[in-house]
Amino acid sequence: MPDAAIPTARVPRNVQGVGPDLEISPQPSWSRVALAGIASWLVPGLAHWLLGERIRGIVLLVTIAATFWSGVAIGSMRGTVDPQERRLWFAAQVCAGGNTLAAYGLTLLTPRHVFSSAPVPTSASWLSAEVGVHYTGVAGLLNLLVILDALARADRRGQRRLHAVRGNEGVP
Amino acid sequence: MSLALSGLFASGLSVTGFRHILLMLPLCLSIAVVYKTLRCAHVRQIVPAALALWATIVAAMGAVGLGLWTLYLLTV
């Protein structure tokens, strides 16, 4: 039977790896994969959470957020997330999505006097800034791995659902 | 709210001397945790596998650093 002829179907509870009573939606798998990619970019681990891998998603969220914000705390906001001075590092940081947007937005929204009245010089020492940039850049690259994994899992999940439906067609 | 967050991240830490090398340890740990979280089939395997990978990364980087330092001492 062609795919277009499958509107929705109930999957029985005993189909391994599919989950109980999942509704098979007629939407194409690319939209599910794209949604997983966007969700994972915005919030690291969110796509894994949505795909049912809850503990995995929480571990990824906490680890990547902790790495990113530790880097910002070490190197300071202005010294770390800087698209003008550190373009290549910023490209890596952008892979951390929501974290980078929040840090950059916070930098833009912060009044200048907060930076000028900071007890330690705002442009932290060269070494601190380098360490902070490495932390945030690595967090971004790790999230790139998470995004690719989420894409693969979302694609596999769709294929498994389709196989489960096709396998049940012959079952009375 | 944003002012409080800004104050937290406005000034960086003062990292000097050999202390910055110790900052490699949590970074390697996060790499190991994320990698093993993605690779392990079962969630309970993550912690021991990540710790083993972390120890391997740190030991390998230490060995490479020691080797390069020895090479430096021999040649300079």
Image: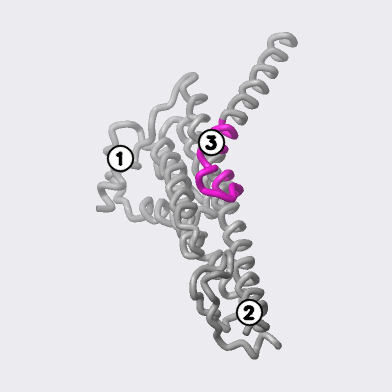
Q: Are marks 2 and 1 on the same chain?
A: yes
Tell me the subunit letter for badge 3: B
- In the picture, the quarter occupied by the N terminus of chain A is bottom right
Is label 2 in contact with label 3 (beta carbons under 8 Å)? no
Classify residue B10 by image quadrant.
top left
Instruction: Residue B29: give x, y in percent of width and height.
Output: 52, 35
Q: Note whether B24 is above or below A85 in the view shown.
A: above
Mark 2: amino acid: Asn
Instruction: Residue A22: give x, y in percent of width and height.
Output: 51, 75
Residue A86, visible in the rendered structure: no
Q: Nearer the viewer, mark 1 or mark 3?
A: 3
- Which residue in the protein does label 1 denote? A116
For label 2, the SS is: helix
Tell me the subunit letter for badge 2: A
- Which residue in the protein does label 2 denote? A168
- Which residue in the protein does label 3 denote? B48
Tell me the subunit letter for badge 1: A
Residue occupying image coordinates x 29% and y 37%? A118
The stretch in magenta equals B35-54
Q: Note whether A142 is above or below A9 in the view shown.
A: above
Q: Nearer the viewer, residue B40 or A50?
A: B40
For label 1, the SS is: helix
Instruction: Using a 10 Å C-alpha cutoff, classify the residue at mark 1 as few (fewer than 14 neighbours), some (14 to 19) or many (20 or more).
Output: some
Q: CA distance from mark 2 to mark 1?
A: 67 Å
For label 3, the SS is: helix
Mark 3: amino acid: Pro
Q: Nearer the viewer, residue B54 or A163?
A: A163
Classify residue B75 by image quadrant.
top right
Q: Note whether A31 is above or below A46 in the view shown.
A: below
Magenta stretch: helix, strand or loop mostly: helix
Classify residue A156 by image quadrant.
bottom right
Q: Nearer the viewer, residue A80 or A141?
A: A141
